[in-house]
Image (cartoon, rainbow, N blue to C red):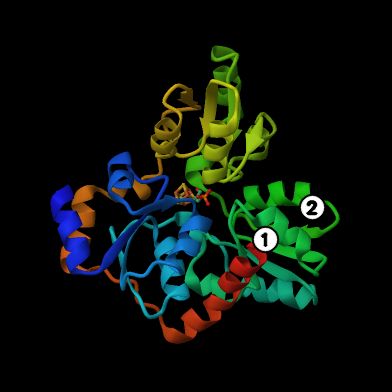
């Protein structure tokens, strides 16, 4: 299958992008692997005319929004992030009416439609810096409540309006389990994703995006780590740090949507060039603004 993929990539002028949460066998055959910010940025730089996206829908949509001239094909049609739907356009209008100078800050884990009503996108790797540097005092942070509270804690000078979206995978990681893991692995540092709940974040030695967690573990002198995010990240953690030990907080840290993607589905996407990400042009143009603003501000 690997040989067929290599041959088809050349024939179809395609490149494979994958998120750290997909299975290691898929990360292995991808041309670029990274966190959501890196993948959005790299999508604007690749030369190939077709992008095969190994991730959830909002990631493929972002690639298409930023690159209307490219064909973006999802490795799996149904890989979708439930949190991406957990914000309402009506509510955004309500908040805008109430707070005249509000900035609607939209976590990139959101649908293209939600992005059209937002001022700026952020990812977990740049949310704090971007929010800090916005001129607005009032911040309506959608959809993720946990990331919003984490950012609010780091930017206390601003007033936050919260939304009740969440990631079911990170919510399943419980503080009591983190405490147990710390007791079992007394020398281990706790590294977690900011989508985890507040009580879990309070137990962490480091909070960061997937690539920031990998970077932290790689640079650290510590040899053992308790990891509070999706298990797919273990592939890159171990690749970069074969001499270090990584423990999940619990065995349920698995995103079922990311795990829909297999080598077979990548091969099928390359053969058929389906399912293609297709967006209404008006939606794409409106959703481009906050995404582009993120790329500019993150620099
Ligand atoms: P990253 O931006 O850290 O890759 O996270 C994406 C995501 O879906 C987290 O659940
Ligand atoms: Fe969405 Fe959570 Fe899966 Fe990330 S881990 S893609 S936020 S469901």
Q: Position of residue 105 (x, y in %)?
A: 66, 65
State the separation of the CA atoms marked 2 and 1. Answer: 13 Å
Name the residue: 48% across, 67% down: 111
**Quadrant location of residue 217?**
top right
Dot 2 corresponds to which residue? 155
Looking at the image, the residue that sits furthest to the bottom is: 282
Disc 1 secondary structure class: strand
- Camera-nearest residue between 79 and 247: 247
Circle 2: is it few (<14), some (14-19), or many (20+) Cα within 10 Å?
Answer: some
Quadrant (top left, top right, bottom left, bottom right) of the C terminus = bottom right
Name the residue: 58% across, 56% down: 123
235 over 262 or under it: above or below: above
Q: Position of residue 29 (x, y in %)?
A: 27, 48
Q: Position of residue 77 (x, y in %)?
A: 29, 62
- Camera-nearest residue between 105 and 289: 289
**Quadrant location of residue 231?**
top left
> Label 1 CB, ligand 2: below 8 Å?
no
- Whether residues under marks 2 and 1 lie with C-beta atoms below 8 angstroms apart, the answer is no
Dot 1 corresponds to which residue? 141
- Camera-nearest residue between 50 and 190: 50
- Left or right relative to 213: residue 74: left
**Going from the N terminus, do you reach mark 2 or mark 1 first?**
1
Q: Position of residue 67 (x, y in %)?
A: 43, 75
Disc 2 secondary structure class: loop
């Amino acid at each position: 299958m690997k040989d067929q993929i290599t041959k088809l990539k050349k024939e179809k002028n395609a490149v494979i992008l994958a998120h750290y949460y997909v299975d290691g066998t898929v990360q292995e055959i991808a041309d670029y692997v990274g966190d959501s910010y890196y993948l959005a940025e790299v999508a604007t730089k690749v030369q190939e005319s077709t992008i095969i996206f190994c991730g959830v829908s909002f990631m493929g949509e972002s690639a298409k929004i930023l690159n209307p001239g490219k064909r973006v094909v999802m490795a799996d049609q149904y890989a979708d992030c439930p949190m991406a739907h957990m914000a309402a356009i009506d509510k955004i209008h309500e908040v805008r009416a109430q707070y005249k100078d509000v900035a609607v800050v939209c976590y990139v884990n959101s649908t293209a439609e939600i992005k059209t009503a937002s001022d700026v996108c952020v990812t977990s790797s740049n949310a704090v810096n971007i929010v800090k540097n916005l001129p607005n005092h009032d911040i309506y942070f959608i959809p993720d409540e946990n990331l919003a509270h984490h950012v609010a804690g780091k930017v206390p000078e601003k007033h936050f309006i919260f939304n009740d979206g969440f990631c079911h995978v990170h919510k399943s990681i419980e503080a009591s389990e983190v405490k147990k893991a710390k007791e079992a692995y007394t020398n281990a540092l706790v590294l977690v994703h900011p989508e985890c709940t507040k009580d879990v974040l309070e137990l962490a030695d480091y909070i960061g995006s997937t690539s920031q967690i990998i970077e932290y573990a790689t640079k650290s002198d510590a040899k053992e780590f308790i990891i509070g995010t999706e298990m797919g990240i273990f592939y890159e953690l171990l690749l970069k740090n074969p001499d270090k030990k990584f423990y999940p907080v619990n065995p349920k840290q698995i995103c079922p949507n990311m795990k829909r993607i297999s080598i077979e589905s990548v091969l099928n996407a390359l053969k058929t060039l389906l399912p293609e990400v297709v967006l209404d042009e008006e939606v794409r143009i409106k959703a481009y603004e906050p995404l582009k603003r993120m790329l500019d501000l993150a620099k």
